[in-house]
């Protein structure tokens, strides 16, 4: 299985970028992983919230292959402990899917088309974080999940 993380916009903070890249490198020892950034929309001031979600949604859907399994990082999603998330990842790998696509949406969330295409939603917290921080958090949690599955000492109970 391959994991692709799709995110809208670039990471402006160089410190965050270094941390994200660190976990991306660590993940390569466990699974094929790719972080793909979808460029920010231009002239968003001229777009309504729903128009922005529609345009971003169209860009997200264009990045998917028909066999991909799509999971949205969404405030209304299921919250997992790190151990539960590792079990979730193991089930995805056991299911035989070729690519699991996790998506961090834009500032207003996802379009209806993206919600309809998704096979699930995950929430990382009840709190709101910047989209740039979420990139770091999810890459770290994916790495943590694999260390849990391999019984490595990274995760402590």
Image (cartoon, helix red, strand yellow):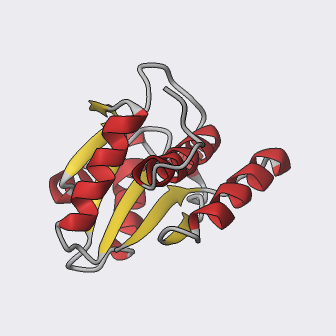
**Is 56 in front, or is 80?**
80
Q: Would residue 68 be found to the left or right of residue 27 on screen?
A: left
Front residue of 82 and 47: 82
Quarter of the figure with residue 78 = top left
Q: On the image, which quarter does residue 73 sit in?
A: top left
Q: Quadrant of the N terminus?
A: bottom left
Q: Residue furthest top?
A: 127
Q: Is residue 110 visible?
A: no
Q: Position of residue 116 (x, y in %)?
A: 15, 54
Give the residue at x 41% y 55%: 103
Q: Residue at x 58, y 71 (%)?
A: 28
Is residue 26 shown left or right of residue 149? right
Residue 11 is at least partly visible in this image: yes
Percent across and percent down for residue 121 are 27, 43
Label tally? 0
**Is residue 65 toward the left or the right of residue 63 in the image?**
left
Residue 152 lies, with reference to residue 123, above or below; the image says below
| Image quadrant assignment for residue 81 | top left
Q: Look at 35% across and 75% down and name the residue there.
A: 62
Left or right: 68, with 57 as reference point: left
Of residue 51 and residue 113, the one placed in the foreground of this image is: 113
Residue 99 screen position, x and y as percent: 32, 73
Q: Report x, y in % for residue 142.
A: 48, 51
Q: Is residue 62 above or below residue 55?
A: below
- Tell me if residue 48 comes above or below residue 127 in the rendering: below
């Amino acid at each position: 299985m391959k994991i692709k993380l799709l995110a809208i916009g670039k990471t402006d903070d160089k410190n965050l970028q270094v941390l994200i890249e660190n976990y991306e490198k660590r993940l390569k020892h466990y699974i094929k992983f790719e972080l793909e950034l979808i460029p920010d929309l231009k002239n968003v001031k001229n777009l309504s919230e729903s128009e922005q979600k529609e345009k971003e949604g169209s860009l997200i859907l264009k990045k998917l292959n028909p066999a991909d399994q799509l999971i949205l990082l969404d405030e209304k999603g299921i919250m997992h402990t790190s151990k539960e998330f590792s079990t979730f990842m193991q089930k995805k790998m056991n299911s035989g899917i070729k690519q699991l696509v996790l998506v961090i949406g834009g500032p207003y969330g996802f379009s209806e088309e993206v919600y309809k295409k998704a096979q699930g939603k995950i929430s990382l917290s009840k709190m709101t974080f910047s989209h740039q921080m979420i990139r770091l958090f999810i890459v770290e949690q994916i790495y943590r999940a694999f260390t849990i599955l391999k019984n490595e000492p990274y995760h402590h109970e």
